Image (tube, rainbow, N blue to C red):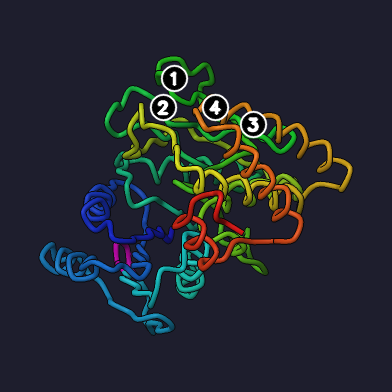
Amino acid sequence: MTGIIILNWNGWEDTIACLKSLYQIEKGDFFIVLVDNGSINDSVDHLSAWLKDEDKKHYILGQGETLDVNLQNKDCILYCLKENYGFAKGNNYAIDLARKYSPDYLLLLNNDTEVEADFLWQLETFIQANEEYKVLTPMIRYFYDKNKIWNCGGKLIFGLRKYYYGDDLASSIKEENFIPISLITGCAFFFPIDLIENEKLFTEKYFFGEEDFDFSLRMQERGVKMACVLSSQIYHKVGASTAKVNNLSKIYIHYLDRYMDVKAHFSPLKFYIWKNIYYVYIILLLIRRGFSIKKIACFIKLLSKNHKIMDGVSQEYFSYVISHNIEDIE
């Protein structure tokens, strides 16, 4: 049986649409751990009401509570966390709970996705026939343009990432069955329960972002094989032409996370080379985005200072940064 973990934060409408698609799955036994990550709207009320109205067998648990039951196919646990712990910690809490019910596999799934009815069966069938692959992702297409691919995983190249078939048409895929990958996104991935016997799935050093990149680096270091299974398909509700983030404080958080992450995985010499190449990339990127030389200089100075003295981004620092202009951040 597979434990499917869905993290909700103030997004009950998307989450219900995701649940509807999961309950239409034709093959494969699963239970759902639906985690509300401290929503500040009425998400829990809407989710519990929908489960009740649709006559879905479910249990509602508070943080730290467990059930002394054997979960059956399509049972659901609505697990209510006390606060917003971020993506990594919220999912880690859910995994700790899901493991108590002895699933064979776990699947992390974004709440703003919808799935094909056979997507889970395709993942299970592939991993049983190809046991050397320990982490899988489905092909992820855009929800609002289903012929276009969001990504099919990707590859890590010297601390950089490249997605396979990002923004390409599905008809352009050359591979027939699967693509070996070294980069996976947190949007959807599937793995056997024994992958993480003695560790957390995600690092909790970064409140928002970077956890899937760090995971991919760790899997690469361990020699864990990963793949995108092309016959398994889901749809992600991101706009195919979504504008890139142009808030300098949010961009700073992204690159601060990346610098700390790569520093933790690279040798000092390798990181020295990487960081100086990446400074050039960031400067050119910010110039193209239209930021002033003064702001860019402030950005680089701040990034250069803080990646040396910090090893993570707490919720408090994240909130502080995104509520200030780059010139005012310490």
Residue at disc 3, secondary structure: helix
Q: Is residue 270 magenta?
A: no
Alpha carbons under labels 2 and 3: distance apart: 29 Å
Return the disc, 4 or 3, that comes first in the chain's sequence: 4
* Residue type, mark 1 in image: Asp
Residue at disc 2, secondary structure: strand
What segment carries the magenta color? 72-76
Q: Name the residue under label 1.
A: 168
* Residue type, mark 3 in image: Ile
Q: Are marks 4 and 1 in contact (CB under 8 Å)?
A: no
Where residue 37 sits: x, y (%)? 38, 67
- Residue 266 makes an appearance in the image: yes
Q: Name the residue under label 3.
A: 283
Determine the residue positioned at 40% across, 18% down. 169
Q: Mark 2 points at which residue?
A: 149
* Residue extending furthest toward the front: 294
Q: Is 49 placed left or right of 104 in the picture?
A: left
Return the disc, 2 or 4, that comes first in the chain's sequence: 2
Determine the residue positioned at 61% across, 65% down. 200
The local crowd at label 1, few if under 14, some if 14 to 19, many if 20 or more residues have their Cα within 10 Å, is: some
Where residue 73 sits: x, y (%)? 32, 62
Q: Does the magenta stretch include residue 75?
A: yes
Residue at disc 1, secondary structure: loop
The correct choice, above or below, for 93 with respect to 312 in the image is below
Return the disc, 1 or 3, that comes first in the chain's sequence: 1
Q: Are marks 2 and 1 in contact (CB under 8 Å)?
A: yes
Disc marking residue 304 = none
Of residues 226 and 277, the one nearer the viewer is: 277
Where residue 173 sits: x, y (%)? 48, 18
Return the disc, 2 or 1, that comes first in the chain's sequence: 2
Alpha carbons under labels 1 and 3: distance apart: 28 Å
Where residue 19 sits: x, y (%)? 26, 54
